[in-house]
Image (tube, rainbow, N blue to C red):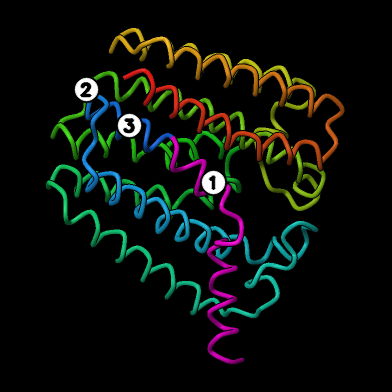
Amino acid sequence: MSISERLHQYALLMRLHRPIGIYLLLWPTLWAVWISASGYPCITNITIFSLGVLIMRSAGCVINDYADRHFDPHVQRTQDRPLATEKVSEREALGLFAILCLLGFSLVLLMNWFTVLLSLVAVFLAVTYPFMKRYTHLPQVYLGMAFGWAIPMAFAAQMSQIPPIAWILFSANILWTIAYDTLYAMVDREDDLKIGVKSTAILFGSADKLIVGILHLTALLLLIEVGQQIRLGVFFYIGLSAAAGLAIYQQWLIKDRLPERCFQAFLNNHWFGLVILLGIIGGY
């Protein structure tokens, strides 16, 4: 295999061709970056956290595919991934994961020591998340913690402390993550049942649509509480209204639980997170 083809396989392993995961991690991170700086974040923090999202999401994809290397060949949607097809070896995947983690850690070293210590938790969550689906039907909760850990880190970087509002934002992000990752799991539900992988889509069963709706609603209510505590302006609530409209649209998409429609609803959460960010920026 040529060097260019090997690099191409590494890029596929990091899923750089599918940026949805980057967006879903980036938007709540920037929520926290903006709020922790009272609407005026410095370009350094924006850059460091944005690059950190890109690097750690890539690392998460690599370790996830390593953990699922024996499952992915049996799932239609994942059977062409580089580890499943053995175009990338297990040793190469672990080496790439280590390099990405070192790159991410080098970025964090530019910040205060409180943020550095918190980053160790982020790495632990990223490494252990892929294995949760073997032991619990709630891996989506763990993913919410892993994807949301940048929120307390952003407050620590800006304020050298984590105020209560950071945990409200963190909780809202966990609920939102459970909602959209349940939609994602609904795509693979039949395959997951066959191979013994657990998920909230399986746990929720016929109540899946209702619970996803409740999760979206509760996340939005927590965000309203955030807006009231820091007295954000009307544009913030316009953003939340747009997000509520998108959540309703997702319910329409999944009404028949068709896998392709569930996946479309999952992808739509990119806009859900973005309009909230635009609302926060406008609210200041």
- Along the polypeptide, which appears first: circle 1 or circle 2? 1
Which residue is label 3 attached to?
A: 32
Left or right, 84 with reference to 167: right
List x then y, in percent, for residue 186.
74, 37
What is the distance, in whole Å, between disc 1 and disc 2 at their CAs?
29 Å
| In the foreground, 120 or 21 | 21
Left or right, 70 with reference to 24: right
Quarter of the picture containing the C terminus is top left
Which residue is label 1 attached to?
A: 132
209 versus 129 height, above or below: above
Which residue is label 2 attached to?
A: 163
**Outermost bottom residue:** 2
What is the distance, in whole Å, between disc 2 and disc 3 at their CAs?
11 Å
Residues tagged 2 and 3 counted as in contact (Cβ below 8 A): no
Q: Residue at x 43, y 67 (%)?
A: 97
Q: Which residues are magenta?
A: 1-27
Residue 10 magenta-highlighted: yes
Disc 2 marks a residue whose amino acid type is Pro
Q: Residue at x 57, y 67 (%)?
A: 13
List x then y, in percent, for residue 96.
44, 72
Helix, strand or loop at mark 3: helix
| In the foreground, 236 or 2 | 236
Disc 3 marks a residue whose amino acid type is Ala
For disc 3, the neighbor class at 10 Å (few under 14, some 14 to 19, many from 20) is: many
List x then y, in percent, for residue 213.
66, 18
Q: Residue at x 53, y 14 (%)?
A: 218
Helix, strand or loop at mark 1: helix
Which quadrant of the view contains residue 227? top left
